[in-house]
C-alpha cells in the first residue's frame, strides 16, 4: 500500500525516477493510473493541487480572455485532486456518435484517425468509473416502466429523443467526485505513487528534440510563490491536465524547440473548443398537457428522472445522423428547461394552430428550450502565452474564443425540423427566439454571464498526419517518442456529448497502449 505524498515534504532538488509520470490528477489521469495499477511499472501521479480547494494554487489558472465572452480561466477548472469533477461537473454522460469520428466534407479539419469502434471496447469500463448505471443511452426507452414517463411520439423526421445518463455515487449523491471516490483504490495500488502539490513548470527535451528527459516541478507556498523545486525523470510521460494547461506546458517548454514542444507545425493551442449553451432558444408548446418528466423534472437539481433500475436519465432532442449528413449540420442536444407563461400573441398563436390541426389545446403547456452546440473547428480559437507570469514563473495563458454565424444558423435548421415534427404529430408547436447573430449572442450572455459547458477540447488535436495534428492515433506527440497526451484536448472534432465519459474511455485505450510501450 502506498501513501499519498505531499511534494512540499520532499527535500529540495529531489530526483524521482518512475517508469511513467502522469501529469494531472483529474478524471483522465486518475482513470489512467487505475488502469495501470496492477501493471509491473512504477507510476507517479503528479497533481498540482491538494485534497481540498486552495486559493493560492487555483490562481495558477489565471489568464486573459479575448474574442467572444468566456468564463474567467480561474473559474472554469479546479486545481485539486479529482480535478473539476469536484463540483464543476454536472454528471452528464453520453457517448460520442459515430459521425463525430468521421471526416465530413462540410466540416473543415474534421476526422479522427479511427472510428468509434476503437473506443467501444472501453465504454463499459468508462461507464463503471463514472458510476452512471447500466449502458442504455439511445436504448433507454426499452428500459422504461410505465411510471418512468413516456417518450414524446414525434412524427418521422430528422430529430429524435436521445438520452443522457448521469453519474451517481454509491451514497446517492451525484456526480462522482473522482478524488475521494478513488482515493482508497490508488492508495492500495502498490505501484502507483500519487504526489500532491506538485506543479510541473517545464518539459525538458533532449538536444535532438525527440525525447523528454525530465520534468521540472515546483510547489506553491501559502503566498502563491514558488517553494521547493525537484525533478522527475520518467521513461514515459502523459500530459493529462486539461486542454488549456496541456497546451500551456507544451508552449512554455521552449528552451530547445523555440515554438514549444510538439509545436513544429504551429498547431499546439489551436482549435480550442467548448460547447456554447445559449438559453431560451425557442418556446415549446405542448397542446395536451405537461411535458413528460423524462425531459424536465422540477424535483431534481439536474432535472433528471430516476427510472425503475435506479439510473438517472434525461431526455433531449438530437438531430439524426442522416439529417446531419443531408443538411450538412453540426451536433446539438436540445433540452427542455423551465415552464413559461405565454403572452397574448403566443396564446392566440396556439389557439389558431390547434384549431387548424383539429386538436384540443385547453391544457397547453409552454417551456423554454436550451441547447448544447458543437462548434465548427476554428484554428483561430486558440490558447497562446501572454507576457504575464504566475507565482511559479510560468507564462500565463491567453485564450481567444470565436463563434461563427454558421454555428448558430446550422442549429436553427434543427429547431425548424423539430417544429415541423411537432406539428406533423399534432403534439405541439415551436416558436424560435433568435434570427440573427445579435439575438444568439444575447442568448449566450443571459443574466450577465457567459453560458458555456466549460468543456475544454481540441488544443492538442489527434491526427495521423503531423501537419494536421499534435498527437497521433495513440495519443503520442508527433516527433517525441516518450510523450503522450490524455483527455479531451486530443479531440479533433467535438460532438455535442459531454466529454468526461468519452475522455475516460480514451484514457483506458491509452493505458493498454502504454503497457506495450513500457514493456
Image (tube, helix red, strand yellow):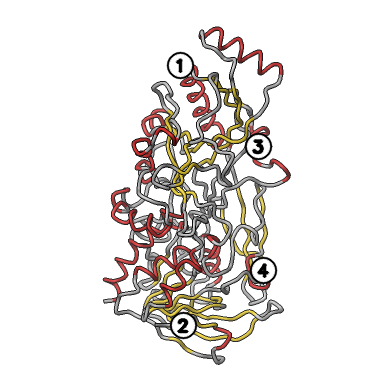
Measured Cα–Cα span from mark 3 to mark 4: 29 Å
Residue shown at 46% from the left, 82% from the top? 3
* Farthest residue, direction right: 448
Circle 3 SS class: helix
Mark with earlier residue (1, 3) = 1
Q: Is residue 257 left or right of residue 37?
A: right
Find out whether the residues at labels 2 and 4 contact each other: C-beta distance under 8 Å.
no
Which residue carries the number 2 mark? 3
Task: Give 184 or 337, whichever is nearer the viewer.
Answer: 184
Which residue carries the number 1 mark? 424
Between marks 2 and 4 in the image, the one whose residue lies nearer the viewer: 2
Between marks 2 and 1 in the image, the one whose residue lies nearer the viewer: 2
Number of residues whose C-alpha sits closer than 10 Å to that of mark 1, classed few (under 14), some (14–19) or many (20 or more): some
Q: Is residue 273 left or right of residue 162?
A: right
Which residue carries the number 3 mark? 443
Q: Is residue 105 left or right of residue 117?
A: right
Mark with earlier residue (4, 1) = 4
Circle 1 SS class: helix
Q: Which corner quadrant of the image does residue 327 belong to?
A: top left
Measured Cα–Cα span from mark 2 to mark 1: 62 Å
Amino acid at each position: 500500500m502506498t501513501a499519498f505524498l505531499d511534494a512540499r515534504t520532499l527535500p529540495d532538488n529531489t530526483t524521482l525516477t518512475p517508469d511513467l509520470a502522469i501529469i494531472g490528477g483529474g478524471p483522465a489521469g486518475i482513470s489512467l493510473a487505475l488502469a495501470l495499477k496492477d501493471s509491473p511499472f512504477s507510476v507517479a501521479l503528479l497533481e498540482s493541487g491538494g485534497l481540498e480547494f486552495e486559493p493560492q494554487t487555483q490562481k495558477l489558472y489565471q489568464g486573459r480572455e479575448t474574442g467572444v465572452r468566456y468564463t474567467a480561466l480561474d473559474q472554469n477548472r479546479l486545481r485539486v485532486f479529482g480535478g473539476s469533477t469536484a463540483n464543476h461537473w454536472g454528471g452528464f454522460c453520453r457517448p460520442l456518435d459515430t459521425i463525430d469520428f468521421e471526416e465530413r466534407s462540410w466540416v473543415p479539419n474534421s476526422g479522427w484517425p479511427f472510428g468509434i469502434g476503437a473506443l467501444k471496447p472501453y465504454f463499459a469500463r468508462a461507464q463503471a468509473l463514472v458510476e452512471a448505471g447500466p449502458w442504455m443511452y439511445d436504448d433507454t426507452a426499452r428500459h422504461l416502466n410505465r411510471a418512468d414517463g413516456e417518450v414524446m411520439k414525434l412524427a418521422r423526421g430528422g430529430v429524435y429523443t436521445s438520452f443522457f445518463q448521469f453519474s451517481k455515487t454509491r451514497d446517492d449523491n451525484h456526480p462522482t467526485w473522482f478524488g475521494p471516490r478513488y482515493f482508497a483504490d490508488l492508495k492500495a495500488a502498490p505501484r502507483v505513487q500519487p504526489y500532491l502539490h506538485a506543479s510541473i513548470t517545464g518539459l525538458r527535451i533532449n538536444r535532438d528534440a525527440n525525447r523528454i528527459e525530465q520534468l521540472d516541478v515546483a510547489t506553491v507556498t501559502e503566498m502563491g510563490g514558488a517553494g521547493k523545486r525537484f525533478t522527475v525523470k520518467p521513461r514515459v510521460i502523459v500530459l493529462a491536465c486539461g486542454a488549456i494547461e496541456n497546451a500551456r506546458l507544451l508552449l512554455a517548454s521552449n528552451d530547445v524547440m523555440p515554438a514549444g514542444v510538439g509545436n513544429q507545425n504551429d498547431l499546439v493551442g489551436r482549435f480550442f473548443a467548448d460547447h456554447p449553451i445559449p438559453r431560451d432558444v425557442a418556446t415549446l408548446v405542448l397542446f395536451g398537457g405537461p411535458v413528460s418528466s423524462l425531459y424536465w423534472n422540477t424535483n431534481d437539481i439536474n432535472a433528471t428522472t430516476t427510472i425503475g433500475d435506479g439510473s438517472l436519465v434525461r431526455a433531449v432532442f438530437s438531430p439524426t445522423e442522416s439529417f446531419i449528413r443531408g443538411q450538412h449540420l453540426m451536433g446539438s442536444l436540445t433540452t427542455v428547461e423551465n415552464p413559461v407563461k405565454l403572452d397574448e400573441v403566443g396564446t392566440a398563436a396556439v389557439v389558431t394552430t390547434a384549431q387548424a390541426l383539429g386538436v384540443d389545446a385547453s391544457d397547453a403547456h409552454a417551456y423554454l428550450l436550451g441547447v448544447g452546440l458543437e462548434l465548427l473547428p476554428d484554428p483561430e480559437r486558440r490558447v497562446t502565452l501572454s507576457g504575464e507570469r504566475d507565482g511559479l514563473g510560468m507564462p500565463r495563458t491567453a485564450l481567444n474564443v470565436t463563434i461563427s454565424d454558421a454555428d448558430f444558423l446550422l442549429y436553427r435548421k434543427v429547431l425548424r425540423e423539430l417544429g415541423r415534427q411537432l406539428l406533423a404529430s399534432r403534439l405541439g408547436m415551436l416558436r424560435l427566439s433568435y434570427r440573427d447573430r445579435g439575438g444568439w449572442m444575447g442568448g449566450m450572455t443571459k443574466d450577465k454571464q457567459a453560458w458555456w459547458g466549460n468543456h475544454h477540447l481540441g488544443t492538442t488535436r489527434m491526427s495521423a498526419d503531423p501537419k494536421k495534428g499534435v498527437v497521433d492515433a495513440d495519443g503520442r506527440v508527433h516527433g517525441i517518442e516518450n510523450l503522450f497526451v490524455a483527455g479531451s484536448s486530443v479531440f479533433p472534432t467535438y460532438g455535442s456529448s459531454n466529454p468526461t465519459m468519452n475522455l475516460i474511455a480514451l484514457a483506458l485505450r491509452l493505458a493498454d497502449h502504454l503497457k506495450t510501450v513500457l514493456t
